Image (spheres, rainbow, N blue to C red):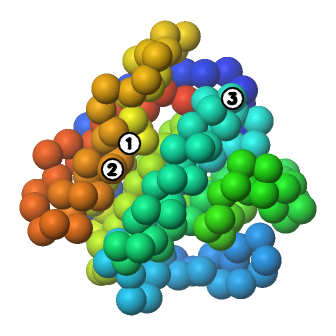
Amino acid sequence: MVATLAALILGQSSLPAKPVKLEMPDSAGVGQAIPAPKAKATLVIFVGVDCPIANRMAPEISRIITTYAARGVQSYLVYPDGSLTKTQVNDHRASFELTCPGIIDGEHKLVKAFGATVTPQAAFVDAKGKVRYLGRINDLYEEHGKIRPKPSRNDLRIALDEFLNGRDITRPVTQTVGCFIGS
C-alpha cells in the first residue's frame, strides 16, 4: 500500500544491475512486456492514487507520456498498491488524463526489479531491459514540505533526451521526494 506520508528517498546511489524482463497484465487485462517490443525505451512511472505528490505531478507525467511516445518510448504507470481494483486504476488514469496503460503491481515485482521506493518515481530501460534511469520526474519538490514555484531541472526529460540522442546519461540516479511504497 502506498502511504500518504511524503518522504525523501535516501541511499539510492546506483541502478539495478540485473536487466528487467517481465510481462504484467494492465488494468484492461492485456499483457504488457517490459521492455516493450519495438520500443527504443520503456518508461515506468510508479504512482499512487492517494499520493498528493504523484497527483500534483500528473499533468507533467501526461505531457511526458505524449511527448516521448512520438519518439519511440512506451510508457506504463505502475500502481504498487495491491488493494486497488482495475476500476480504481482506470478512474485515476482518466481523471488525470494519463493515457498509457496502468499496471497494478500488488506483488511488487516491478518495485523490486527497479528498486522503486516512493511514488512518483520514474525509471526506464533500453530495448534489452537494462535500467538506464531511476529517480525523480523533476525537482519541483526540493525536499519534504518544500515545493518550488516551478521545477528548475527536468531530470526525467533530460535523461530520456540524452539516451534517445545516443549520449551517456549524466545523472542516471536522482533523489526522489514522494510517498513511501509500503510492503
Question: Along the polypeptide, which appears first: circle 2 or circle 1?
Answer: 1
Q: Residue at x 79, y 77 (%)?
A: 28
* Amino acid type of the residue tagged 2 in the rendering: Arg
The residue tagged 3 is 52
Say if 95 sits above or below 77 in the image.
above
In the displayed structure image, the side of residue 137 where residue 161 appears, left or right = left
Q: Pinpoint residue 71: horizontal percent, then vertical percent.
A: 35, 73
Question: Is residue 107 visible to the viewer in this orientation of the structure?
Answer: no
Residue 103, x across and y down, in percent? 67, 65
Quadrant for residue 150, please give it: top left
* Residues packed near mark 1 inside 10 Å, few (<14), some (14 to 19) or many (20 plus): many
Where is residue 67? Give x, y as percent: 43, 62
Distance from Cα at disc 3 to Cα at disc 2: 21 Å
- Disc 2 versus disc 1: distance between alpha carbons? 11 Å
State the residue position of label 1: 135
Circle 2: element type = helix
Q: Nearer the viewer, mark 3 or mark 1?
A: 3
Residue 117 in view (yes/no): yes
Kindly identify which residue carries mark 2.
Answer: 157
Crowding at mark 2 (Cα within 10 Å: few <14, some 14-19, many 20+): some
